[in-house]
Image (tube, rainbow, N blue to C red):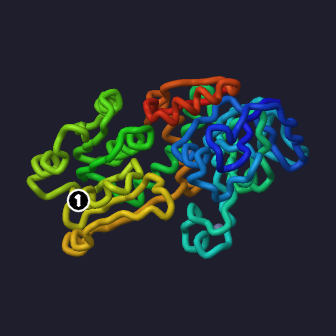
Amino acid sequence: MKAVVLHGPENYPNNYEVMEIEKPVCGEDDILLEMKAAALCGTDKRIFTGGKTKGVRPDSVVGHEICGLIAEVGANVKGYSVGEKVAIANVIPCGHCSACLSGRENACLNRKAIGYEFNGGFEEYILIPKICIESGNVVKLPESVSFAAGALIEPLACCIRGLRNTGTGFNDTVLIIGAGPIGLMHLELSKIAGARKVFVSELDPEKREIALKLGADRVIDSGKEDIAAIIAEETNGEGVDRIVMAIGINALVDSTFKLAKKGGTVCLFAGFPKGKMSEFDPSVIHYNELNITGSTAYKRIDYLQAADMVKSGLIDLDAIVSAKFKLDDFREALDLHMSGKALKVVIEP
Ligand SMILES: [Zn+2]
Ligand SMILES: [Zn+2]
């Protein structure tokens, strides 16, 4: 079968190839999934260029936003049948470490994940192991949900975790930095959570346009407009209640902290490059009593809620898919993804 094999973290773009590998054998406790959609994620940018190596094995298949059809069901597996459409919650917590026991399974110390410790979505058939099935990570979808939207339940679940950490709710003013797929999902979720006004700052005019269509109250051209002046004018000089950094640019951290209201929360949601420092003025955190938080992955409940939102049509994920490519054209897909011009890029078999 065809797969995108990532040989190692170095030598991008010559560190991966689309090649034939052996189709996985479905054991009696496993499910074999026929991949129908696997989306590229910001994390994949860092994985292919060597910026993220944790859990990534040499000569493996990555891809963690996955939807497909069940092709085979092991003899001991109950509750699933061949032909069913399912999406995969790829993060599998251990359930017994201190993070899991304190209610932070998303930050599990021993977590395993499809697309990392187990081969992921950029291949024709994906083996879903027992541990993933038993922890409830295989979620059935109705006909009405597209394969692409099914794959995007995973990043939506991450954004739901981010929304919870940010604490966004009724009557809040919210600023989202960056209108890539993650920023746009945060925008949609903030509106659903009851935010009064959501501002989105973004360089790319096309992405600002989509943010407006998805309900942004005001978009800010971060290249030309003075974001501090606009936020001051829009909030009587007080700043916004909640800020989500949906782009991991270290140089923006300091100026972003200054846009939050007293007692406000700033969520550094995007992945920031490990070991790279930011310079910021701590007195802003001190005097403004800011809450600074991050967000990693999702809990299974976030994934189930994300799936419910997609199933009920409450959130539109197809609107943020900009291109679809066949597995054979993965290189083209990754190039487009790396360019930063597209929203979600989805791989099909
Ligand atoms: Zn992702
Ligand atoms: Zn754990």
Q: Give the structural element (helix, strand or loop) at label 1.
A: strand
**Residue 304: percent from left, percent from top:** 57, 48
Residue at 52 percent of width and 34 percent of height: 337
Q: Which image quarter is the C terminus in?
A: top right
Front residue of 249 and 40:
249
Q: Quadrant of ligand 2?
A: bottom right
Q: Is residue 235 above or below residue 344?
A: below
Task: Identify the residue shown where x is 61% and y is 41%.
Answer: 65
Q: Residue at x 89, y 46 (%)?
A: 27
Instruction: Report whether 68 appears left or right of 208.
Output: right
Image-based side of 314 in relation to 347, left or right: left
Instruction: Examine the rendered structure and indicate whether residue 326 appears above or below residue 268.
Output: above
Image quadrant occupied by the N terminus:
top right
Please state which amino acid type lies under the numbered disc 1: Ala
Residue 188, given in percent of the width and then of the height, sits at 37, 40
Q: Mark 1 Cα within 10 Å, few/some/many (few <14, many 20+)? A: many
Tell me, yes or no, if residue 217 can be seen here. no
Q: Which residue is mark 1?
A: 260
Q: Is residue 161 left or right of residue 197?
A: right
